[in-house]
Image: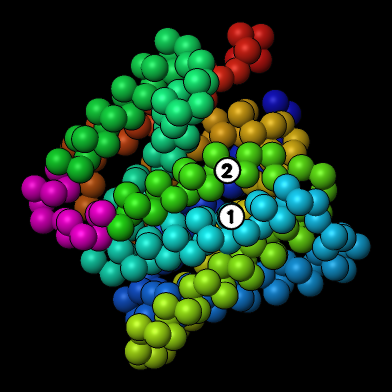
Amino acid sequence: MDFKALFMGFAFAAMWSSAFTSARIIVQYAPPLTALSLRFLISGLLGCAIAWALGQSFRLSRRQWTGVLVFGLCQNSLYLGLNFVAMQTVQASLAAIIASTMPLLVALAGWLFFDTKVRPLGVAGLIAGVVGVTLIMGARLSGGTDVMGLLLLIVGVLSLTAATLAVMGASSGGNVLAIVGLQLLVGAALTAIPAILFEPFVVDWNPTLIGAFFYTTLIPGLAATWVWFLLVGRIGAVRASTFHFLNPFLGVLIAAGFLGESIGPLDVVGVLIIAGGILAVQLSKQSPAAI
């Protein structure tokens, strides 16, 4: 793995992990689905405009259109929509920890439902992930975490897992930024429907909200997705996914640094175990020569 790939991987992990903190800020001042739909709209239009300026084609293959629609529904509308709603009542650090289990869930689903062979190191990683999540959930629930918010986070990460399994390889064939822009526009349309039907448009306009909104629109919303697709194209999905082991650390640290969220001893232990489990699962997928 070359230096550029390492830099892209660390950059993606930092941008992805910061999204939970900026989302937590946004939902304190604005209706979650309305803000999310507007974020998708702006990010999607920017992505499509840049793709057009770069000469990328919007004539996608059938597999790429499947990726656009599935990710627009499962990743943007369900996963991020449920996360934004949940973070009205739960901490950003918990949302980051739950979301970071996605690589573990993908490996588990492949093992249980698709007869994917998992090496002993991968099995150990899955067990570690379960232990780490159990420790954190037990500590947070005993501390008064909102159960409904937690359930929304769990359904959200399951939706992201389903999307990942459904469209593996859908970004191949070029036109990466066009694909990113289109799937964001799909998310904008789908989240706008419940926002219009169920959310009152009550916004507390202030510099903090505006800053957090534009940050989450441009950095986690557009740049992180683009970098991820480029990273996968450079080193492959399996090796790129190894960087997910950084997400529990970074998600908790960023939330603590910017929001002042407390970190308990069990949180620290649980995050370390989950990160180790993610790394073990991803390394188990690589050939011995590549590790």
Disc 1: which residue: 70
Residue 142, x across and y down, in percent: 8, 48
Residue 155 shown in magenta: no
Magenta span of residues? 139-151
Label 1: few (<14), some or many (≥20) within 10 Å? Answer: many
- In terms of image quadrants, where is residue 186? bottom right
Residue at image position (17%, 56%) is 147
Helix, strand or loop at label 2? It is helix
| Camera sees residue 77 | yes
> Farthest residue in the right direction?
55
Helix, strand or loop at label 1? It is helix
Disc 2: which residue: 166
Give the residue type that dot 1 points to: Val
In the displayed structure image, the side of residue 4 where residue 56 appears, left or right: right
Residue at image position (70%, 74%) is 45
Do labels 1 and 2 touch, CB within 8 Å?
Answer: yes
Give the residue type that dot 2 points to: Ala
Q: How far apart are marks 1 and 2 (CA)?
A: 8 Å
Of residues 13 and 129, the one drawn nearer to the viewer in this rendering: 129
